[in-house]
Image (cartoon, coloured by chain):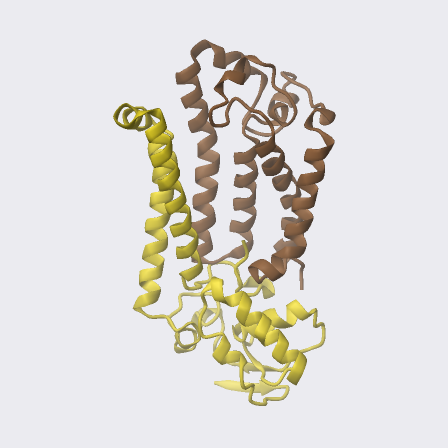
Amino acid sequence: MAGRTGRAVADPTADTLCEQPAASQRGRYIKRIAASILKWGWTSPVLADEHGGLIAGHCRVAAGAMLGLTVPIPVIVAHGCGPEAHCLCGEPTSTLRAAEHGFSHSGERAVLSLLLAALFFTGIHLGIAGTQMRDRAIGMLGEKGYRVAFAIASVIGLVWFVAAYNRAPYFVTWGCSNGGSRLRSS
Amino acid sequence: MLEWWKPVAIILMLPASLLVVVGLTTPNPTSIAQEGRVRQPPQGIVRVTRHPFLTGVGLWAVVHLIGNGDVASLVFFATWAIVALAGTVSIDAKRRRLLGGAWEPFAAQTSIVPFAAIAAGRNRFIPREIGLWRWAIALLAYVLMLFGHAPIVGVSPSPV
């Protein structure tokens, strides 16, 4: 299925470093890859489909972008792996994507945790603070008690929400079209 | 991350930063424990929107929601956008309930959507009321985030 363009030399670090897609770790990985590129050069080609979409090597591309590289990079083209085969932008069902993202039940749990955190965050801000439930809570706890309880719940909700986001695996929706990289930004 | 969106994001994050920073530092009857200010005429950024902080957060969330393009970011930033933008309506309802008739004149002179009250002739924009130091802090925060984005978040906001 794969054709080759450019050169292909084993890169001792990049793929290993990018096994974890968690955003919280990505920045550190990318910096390490950038340091590796500076030291060794671009030693391993990235994998792309015939439409030019990246399949593997996103962290290396991001590291290159971080370094401001504008030169062409070595690419292996995977023929027969276009969008219709869902290799790039579709559901993460292909072996390639599963292997790249290390997707597993822990990934599903991370997504579930993110959804629960989102519900909790929305619930306390709009469901309680934004409705007459707030008045009932004040009736039970008093104004000061309510404010303290809300502040604690709010901080817990925020920390949970951000942590769940950072742990969540990366499933592309529209972010990989037109040469976009699979990196999150906040 | 959508590369083509990055220049748009860089532009839109400037008003978002202004709204957030100036909103946080401006006295406002919609802020926590400042209901008593409702009888004072709206000043500074409150002339632009009575919910500057929340509209700024909403704008930040929408900009990042569009730019990231992955499921986790969709959940994360859509939640922020909903909480921030629905929060403006929710706070209005709460203040109306709490303040009764005192709320209406203030609400009539201001708007949720930035510049809507000014465009409708119910208020006017006086930039100097915002204060030079607030403009400066907001601009500084914007520049810091622009250049600090790559080292802090790990993603450069500059197009490749």
Q: Position of residue B50 (x, y in %)?
A: 56, 25
The mark total stands at 0
**Chain in yellow on the image:** A
Looking at the image, the residue that sits furthest to the left is A140
Q: Horizontal placement of A71 versus B75: left or right?
A: right
Most foreground residue, B2 or B104:
B104
Q: Is residue B81 visible?
A: yes
Residue A95 lies, in percent from the top left, at: 39, 77
Please identify the residue farthest to the top as the structure is shown. B101
Q: Check the image and report above or below for A70 versus B86.
A: below
Residue A80 in the image: x percent, y percent?
Answer: 48, 79
Taking the spot 39% from the left edge, 17% from the top edge, the residue there is B97
Eyeballing the image, is B45 above or below A61? above
Question: Image quarter for residue A50?
Answer: bottom right
Q: Where is residue A81 shown, x and y percent of the image?
A: 48, 76
The residue depicted at 72 percent of the width and 38 percent of the height is B136
Give the vertical position of B47 relative to A99 (above or below). Answer: above
Residue A41 visible in this rendered orientation of the protein: no
Give the quarter of the image for residue A94: bottom left
Chain B shown in which color? brown
A6 on left or right of A91: right
Q: Is residue A100 left or right of residue B55?
A: left
**On screen, A84 above or below B84?**
below
